[in-house]
Image: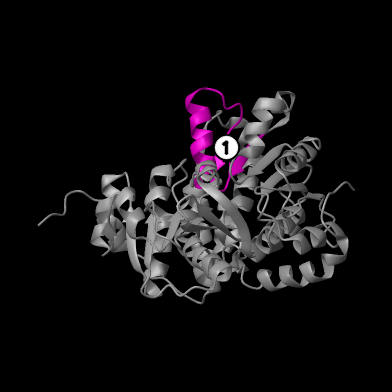
């Protein structure tokens, strides 16, 4: 079995941590039990480019139980948990190509190693796997049934490909499922981003000015949790509807150039490039702390930060000090990569339970229906989304009311008015 990991001796620790995560993922466990009986993925190869975490391990074990051959690589150079990668190889027999801190060349070599296995289904977090297929490995396209995409950034890239008629196989946008983005993006990103910042800095948030760039579902979650810890939260936005919502939620909304002058902490969560640029870095106060929780390390203008600096040094794990030309010091967390995974452990298992249940059931859906789909980006079927919500509530011991026959009839009628 081919693999490239840091150290196979880390496997026992990884195995224990995977078991701990699985205890908070009851929906995926129910799916795993059904998959083991029905084997709906039998004979299919899945190439997965995901953050190699304990939660991902529970997902790939579920896919394996369904009969799939799974090949895994990292979707970010700094998000791999090396003990998990080792456990997947040793205890689960899943070929894994992931080493925390790998350079860019190794990162893409790992993607190519997965593609060398000729997967029939892709599973992406950021669309690097799919984009590599379309740019370098076009000969594989005819073998691929379809794919899934986990995150906002990846969905944006894939929709762009579809709009330009470049996309050559169907993709299911797992990110857009209600049981994913309403919970994972808001509660998962909110908690894990703050967790990463606190681990990297050990700074007090209470009383600090905390700037959140972007008020999508991830930004909502970060702003909510920062306020809960006593920070004075400022939101920056380009979308008037989202900005209005931030105002109605009680946050101050400012242009980024104004917010840059007063912020103590900055977090970017937009999926766009150079959200914090040179002009913003120049006006920040001494000691400002910069973090990113978007998928790629492009939201903070790292090149300008380096060019402005005459000295930089590592002070703590995941904390780099830049001394700019006027003697001011700025602090970058996690090399500008996903702070919740570089400095912490990513989203809590209980919220990834729903996200990865969507991944597993979407893979099953592709096996059954992939040949009938066009080369475009699809939403997760509503019946999958609702079933995951039902299973999650059931696992929490929460029961719902049922519509009476009369209520059902009323909702379907048009002639009962005032």
Dividing the picture into quarters, in which one does residue 35 lie? Answer: bottom right
43 is higher (above) or lower (below) than 232 = above
At which x and y percent is residue 264? 40, 64
Q: Quadrant of residue 223?
A: bottom left
Inspect the magenta stretch and tell me whether residue 154 lies in it. Answer: yes
Instruction: Tell me: 82 left or right of 176.
Output: right
Foreground residue among 258 and 396:
258
Left or right: 274, with 118 as reference point: left
Residue 399 belongs to the span the image colors magenta: no
99 with respect to 24 (left or right)? right
Is residue 181 visible from the viewing direction of this image? yes
Total marks shown come to 1
Q: Secondary structure at mark 1?
A: strand
**93 or 362: nearer the viewer:** 93
The residue shown at (67%, 69%) is 22
Q: Is residue 364 above or below residue 248?
A: above
Can residue 337 be seen in this snapshot?
A: no
Q: Position of residue 349 (x, y in %)?
A: 60, 67
User: Splitting the image into 4 quarters, where does residue 338 fall?
Assistant: bottom right
Start-end of magenta stretch: 145-173
**Badge 1: residue crowd in 10 Å (few <14, some 14–19, many ≥20):** many
Which percent across, then down, holds residue 368? 64, 41
Q: Quadrant of the C terminus?
A: bottom left
Q: Residue at 85% across / 60% down in the picture? A: 7
Residue 42: image x %, image y %?
A: 77, 46
Q: State how the image is colored.
A: one colour
**From this viewpoint, which residue is outermost toward the front?**
326
Q: Nearer the viewer, residue 377 or 275?
A: 275
Name the residue beneath numbered marker 1: 171
What residue appears at the point 32 percent right and 48 percent down from the top-left corner? 257
Residue at the far right in the pictured view? 1
């Amino acid at each position: 079995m081919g693999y490239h990991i840091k150290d196979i001796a880390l496997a026992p620790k990884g195995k224990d941590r995977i078991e701990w995560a699985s205890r908070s993922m009851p929906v995926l466990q129910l799916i795993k039990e059904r998959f083991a009986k029905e084997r709906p993925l039998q004979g299919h190869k899945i190439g997965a480019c995901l953050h190699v975490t304990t939660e991902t391990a529970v997902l790939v074990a579920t896919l394996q139980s369904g009969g799939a051959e799974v090949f895994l690589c990292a979707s970010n150079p700094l998000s791999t948990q090396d003990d998990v990668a080792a456990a997947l190889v040793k205890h689960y027999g899943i070929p894994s190509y992931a080493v925390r801190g790998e350079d860019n060349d190794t990162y893409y070599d790992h993607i190519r190693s997965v593609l060398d296995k000729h997967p029939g289904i892709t599973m992406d977090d950021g669309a690097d796997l799919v984009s590599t297929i379309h740019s370098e490995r076009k000969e594989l396209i005819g073998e691929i049934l379809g794919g899934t995409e986990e995150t906002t950034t990846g969905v944006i890239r894939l929709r762009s490909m579809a709009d330009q008629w470049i996309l050559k196989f169907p993709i299911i946008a797992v990110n857009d499922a209600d049981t994913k983005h309403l919970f994972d993006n808001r509660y998962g990103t909110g908690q894990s981003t703050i967790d990463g910042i606190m681990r990297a800095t050990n700074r007090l948030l209470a009383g600090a000015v905390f700037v959140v760039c972007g008020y999508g579902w991830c930004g909502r979650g970060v702003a909510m949790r920062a306020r809960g810890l006593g920070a004075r939260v400022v939101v920056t936005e380009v979308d008037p509807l989202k900005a209005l919502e931030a105002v109605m939620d009680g946050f101050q909304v400012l242009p980024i150039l104004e917010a840059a002058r007063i912020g103590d902490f900055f977090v970017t969560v937009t999926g766009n490039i150079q959200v914090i640029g040179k002009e913003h870095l120049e006006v920040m106060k001494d000691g400002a702390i910069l973090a990113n929780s978007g998928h790629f390390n492009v939201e903070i203008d790292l090149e300008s930060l380096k060019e402005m600096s005459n000295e930089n040094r590592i002070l703590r794990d995941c904390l780099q000090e830049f001394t700019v030309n006027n003697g001011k010091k700025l602090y970058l967390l996690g090399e500008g990569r996903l702070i919740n995974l570089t400095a912490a452990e990513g989203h809590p298992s209980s919220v990834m339970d729903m996200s990865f249940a969507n991944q597993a059931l979407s893979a099953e859906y592709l096996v059954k229906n992939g040949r009938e789909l066009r080369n475009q980006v699809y939403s997760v079927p509503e019946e999958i989304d609702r079933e995951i919500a039902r299973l999650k509530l059931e696992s929490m011991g929460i029961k719902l009311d049922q519509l009476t026959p009369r209520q059902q009839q009323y909702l379907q009628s048009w002639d009962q008015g005032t």
